[in-house]
Image (spheres, rainbow, N blue to C red):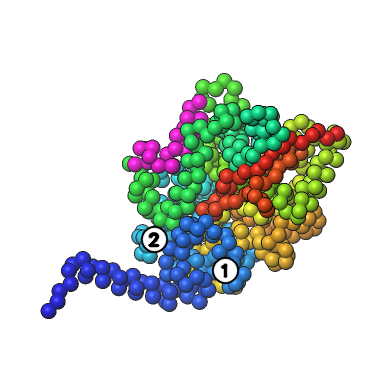
Amino acid sequence: MVFSSPISLFAEWTLLFLLLLSLKRRYLSSLRDIPGPFFASFTGLWQIFRIIKGDEHVAMIKLHREHGPFVRVSEKEVSVGDPDAAREVLQAHLRKVSSTVFFLVYPLTPEREAHTEFYSVFSLPDYNYVNQMSECDPKEVIRRSRNVNAGYALSNVIRSEPEVDALVQLLEQRLDECISQPQKQASAVVDLNHWITYFTFDVLGEVTFSKPFGFLAAGRDIRDTVANSRYLVAYLAFVGRYPALHHATLGNPLLSRLGIQPTSHIYDTVEAAMADRSHNPHVRRDMMAQWEGVREAHPDRMEEGEIGNAALANVGAGGDTTSATIQACLHYVINTGNGGLLRRLREEMDGAQSRGELSETISFAETQRLPFLQACIKETYRCHPAFGTAYSRMVPPEGFTVGGRTFTSGTVLSVNSWVINTSRSVFGADADTFNPDRWLDPEEVKRMAPYLMHWGTGYNQCPGRNLANLETCKVVAQLVRDYDIEPTQPGGSFTFKNRLLCLADPHFCRLKRRGKVG
Ligand code: HEM
C-alpha cells in the first residue's frame, strides 16, 4: 500500500479545491453568460497580468468592441461599456470598490469590510488615514467632499494664479537653460516629463501649502519624491487587487511608520510641508486655509485629520496625472496630421499675440478665448484619460438593474474611462483619432461632453479638475507659443504604461526658442 506524504496530500487537496472553486465560478455564477477572457471568469490574475503589461485600456476597448456592453473581467467583476449604462452606474450612489480580496484565486476576506477594498489602499500611510479617495461609503465621500470643496473651487484656484505664473516663468527659465547649455546652442534635447512633472508638483505645493516643493528651483527631484510617486502608483495598482495583503503588511499601522515603503514617503513629504507652512509668515488663502476655515465654522462636521488627509490626497492624485495630460496634449498637437494641427493652433495663438491679447505669461482667462486650443485640450481629455484603471462600484443587497440587466448583490460593476471616451456611438466612426474639430460645434459639445470620463462622474468625480485644467491650459499655450518642440522619435516620443494611472515615460523632445510674434 502506498501512502502519500502529508505535503503531497495537502497539495492534492488544495488543487482539487481550487479546481472545484474555479468550475463553480465559471459555470455556476450568475455572471456565467457574460462574455470575457476565459481566465477572467474564475481568477483575478487576468487583471494582474494586465497591470504587468500596462495595457488595461487597450484590452478593455478591444473586448468591448468584440463583446458589446458587458464584459466579465474577474469572477465577480463586470465592465460596463455602454456610455449611458456607465453613467448610470457612476451616478447611482453605489459603494466604491474594485475587487474582492483574492489570494491567487481564493477570496481571502469578506468583501464588505471597508479596509479590505481596493480604494482603501489609497489611505496613506495606512488604513487609519482615510481620505476622500479611500473612503468607500458614498454618504461619507459626499460629507467629506462638502468639507473640502471650497478649496477646489475655480474662484479659489484662480486666487493662486500669480504664484502659478511665477512657476510657469521658472519652468521656461529652466528649459532655456537646458537649451543654452553646455555651450550656447540653438536647441537641445530635453526630457519634458522631467520638467513638467516638477512644475505640476510645485503647483500642488503652492496651491495647497502656499509654497512650492522646490523641484523647479532646485532643478532636481528633491528626496526622490517624484520618482517615488511612480513606485507608489505601481505598488497601489498591484495591492489594490489584494488590499488585505497590503493592510496586513506594508500598509499595517505597525509597519507603516517605518518609512520603508513608498506610501510613507509621500506622507512624510506632506507632513514636512504642513510643518513648514505653520512657520510661514506668507501663507495665503490657500487650500489648507480654506479647509481650516470650514473646520473652524463647522467643528461638528469636519474632523481635524480630514485637513491633512485631503492635502495628502492632493499630492498623491494631482501631480503626475496633470503632467501626463499636459504632455499628451503637446504630443497630439505636434504629431497629428503632419503638423496641420500645430499650424492651426499657432495661427490662432500668433493672431491673438499680434492683437495684444496674450500676456508674457499667458493667463487662464486668455486661454479661454482661444477656441482651437480649448478644442485640443478637450480632445486630449478624451484621448488620454490619466486615470487608466476602471472606476468600480459594488452592487447593493437589493441588486441593481442597468442596461436591461439585473445584477445581484456583491457583483462589482466597473467603468473604464478609455472605453467610454472612445465609444463610437458617442464620438463617431473616428473615435480612435485625435480630432479637436469635433469640439468646435456647440451643439455637438452639449451632446458629447456628458460622456467624457476623464474626471470620472458622479459623487467621486475629481475635485482637482479646476486646478488641473488651469495648469493644462496655461502650460500648453505657453510652450506652444514660445518653443518649437520636435519629438526625438518619428511619430512622437510620448509613451506610457497604464498601471492605475497612465503616466508618461521619459519624454525626450528637441526644444528651440521661437522668435517673438507681434
Ligand atoms: C489631469 C489631471 C487629473 C486627472 C485626469 C484626474 C482624475 C481623477 C479621477 C478620474 C478621479 C476619480 C477616481 C475614481 O472615481 O476612482 C480623481 C479623484 C481625485 N482627484 Fe483627480 N485628477 C487629476 C488632477 C487632480 C489634481 C490636480 C488634484 C488636486 C488638486 C486631484 C485630486 C483628486 C482627489 C483628492 C481625488 C479623490 C476624490 C474622491 O475620491 O472623491 N486630481 N481624479
How would you rate the neighbour count of disc 1 (Cα within 10 Å): few for under 14, some for 14-19, many for 20 or more?
Answer: many
Vertical side of 44 occupied by 467: above or below: above
The quadrant where residue 471 appears: top right
| Start-end of magenta stretch | 255-276
How would you rate the neighbour count of disc 2 (Cα within 10 Å): few for under 14, some for 14-19, many for 20 or more?
Answer: some
Give the distance between the C-alpha atoms of the residues marked 2 and 1, in whole angstroms. Answer: 23 Å
Secondary structure at numbered mark 1: helix
Q: Amino acid at mark 1?
A: Leu
Secondary structure at numbered mark 2: strand
- Percent coordinates x, y for residue 435 in the rendering: 74, 56
Given residues 129 and 44, the one toward you in this image is 44
Residue 267 forms part of the magenta stretch: yes
Can residue 365 be seen from the camera position used here? no
Given residues 145 and 166, the one toward you in this image is 166
At 57% across and 30% down in the image, what residue appears? 219
Vertical side of 450 occupied by 261: above or below: above
The quadrant where residue 296 appears: top right
Can residue 246 be seen from the camera position used here? yes
At 36% across and 64% down in the image, what residue appears? 106
Q: In the rendered view of the protein, which quadrant contains the N terminus?
A: bottom left
Mark 1 — residue?
63
The residue furthest bottom is 1
Q: Is residue 39 left or right of residue 512?
A: left
> On residue 102, which mark appears?
2
> On residue 153, which mark appears?
none
